[in-house]
Image (cartoon, rainbow, N blue to C red):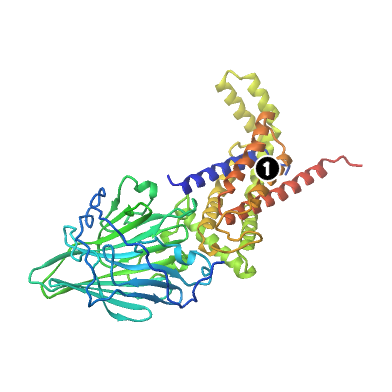
Amino acid sequence: MSFQTRIFLAVALCAMIFIVFEGLNPPPPTEEVADGKAAVETKAEAEEAGTEAGRTGGGAERQPEAEESEPTPEIPVVEHSLHNDLLALQITNRSPGRGGLVSAVQMLSTQFQGHATATDSLALAGKRTLEVAITDDQGDPLVPRGAAYEVTEVTEDRITLVHRTAKLEVTQRLELLGGYEGRLEVEVSNKGGQPLPHRVHVRTRIGQSESRYDIRRGVCRTPEDVEDEDQSDLEDGPIKHGPGVVWGGVDGKYFTSLVVPKQPVQDCELALSDDGAGLETRLGTVSEEVAPGRASTHVFGLYVGPKELERLKAFSAVDSGVQLEQAIDWGFFGGVSEWLGKMLLALLRWFHDLVQNWGLSIVLLTVLIKLVTLPLTLKQMSSMKRMKEIQPEMNKIKEKYGDDRVKQGQEMQALFARSGVNPLAGCFPMLVQLPIWFALYSMLGAAVELVHEPFLWLPDLTEQDPFYILPLALGALMIVQNRMMPSTMDAAQAKLMRWVMPIMFTVFMLFLPSGLGVYIFANIVLSLVQTAIQVGTNKNAEAPAT
């Protein structure tokens, strides 16, 4: 279980405890970067070394590789930058690994420029972000390590590289399309006199994040589900899925690098990188035999960039009808959270269009959700208030039939029938609201729109509060709210709940993104206002007439 999952479950449990407690005690009714279109200057500083012969469960493309060869004098080493309006890729024509093509990524959107995110969101220093390898059907390489590719065509957004031997010719064409999309074509031509069985392997990599919240993972979209594994899942060896994989890649909380094959895929393998410093996903095509003098072309769509819902849904690099938006983690309730999360994200964007501030948009969305769920909250409080009114009679029954559980239950049911009280009525509204709150929590934790967006003293809504003001204020407000709420618990239990819950929430909020903190803080403020109004109304109603 990942750290992110453990944090989510812990916060979810605390939220449930807090809601139940509230229900049982109701109140009376500046880093500089190059210009957007400039070439990416980052180059890989270290070359990949060693082989993968010792890796467990490698399967195809995990065999010992040919000795690395130096580039021939006729083919000089070339570094070139492809770019469009939002994305730049640093391309190399010589691989220090198994066919490296993309050595660095830079996102050119103004949202990311000026931040390290622009260059290191999908980076793994010294590694190739995107690699292509050609093997035979046994997994032995047909193109040696370190082989140089001749650059035969290069434009602003397109490059063609060719590697020739006596037996085959491999042509790689990489083209950037609109936004964060690209298209990779790998053509294998048989120049020999015998049939050439071969497979094409495309590997993507991502480095580990310094943030415990931004969990990096490898993903494979199988016909059944999205399979994802983080570093802890892969420590015992690679995990392979297939056949029938639709797409695969690597990603973090907000950014992803995905490969979508047009032809059938035999397997999708998730593994740690050679040095354990990152994760990698390999997609291997089905073995195909090329007759002498013929060629076979393999097409892959690419998406490299932020996990923006609309761009993922509109992916069209290959005509395969894929659903890349499934790479977004919508949280605990699966399809329900996804449906609610998309709706809440649309509302958040709508509020942002009105106020042009993401932090204020979170507050307004929290207010809206509070208003929508207010009837359920009032119904829950009404039910719990009636339960409180019959509490003295319930205590008498417990004292009278303390040793006879059967008789005690019968008398309780009779009491509920006479009073017209349903003990479960107070729980149902809470259960209806939980998916909404969890979906809101998950949506705010996955919305890439909040990356690098400041609010008040918070420099980034996807990072923790650097001054810890928000977590401490949240804990203090919870203490105030608990003191305002009358309790039916005994003194020891009331004291425990009064202090433990605020302390636990404060500790959790120290490490969670501040955007989530804004949401929780706003929700507690609204609950505090609601409690104060209800307490004041009840006091006025109970005051004797003069």
Q: Quadrant of residue 257?
A: bottom left
Which quadrant is home to the N terminus?
top left
Percent x, y for residue 99? 27, 66
The residue at 61%/66% (across/down) is 351
Establish if 328 lies above or below 10: below
Establish if 513 lies above or below 430: below
The residue at 67%/43% (across/down) is 381
Establish if 254 lies above or below 433: below
Establish if 241 lies above or below 126: above
Percent x, y for residue 40? 42, 73
Percent x, y for residue 357? 62, 66
Considering every residue shown, the one lying at the far top of the view is 403
Percent x, y for residue 55? 26, 50
User: Is 374 on the left or on the right of 128, as rendered?
Assistant: right
User: Is 26 on the left or on the right of 280, as rendered?
Assistant: right
Q: Secondary structure at mark 1?
A: helix
Say which residue label 1 marks: 382
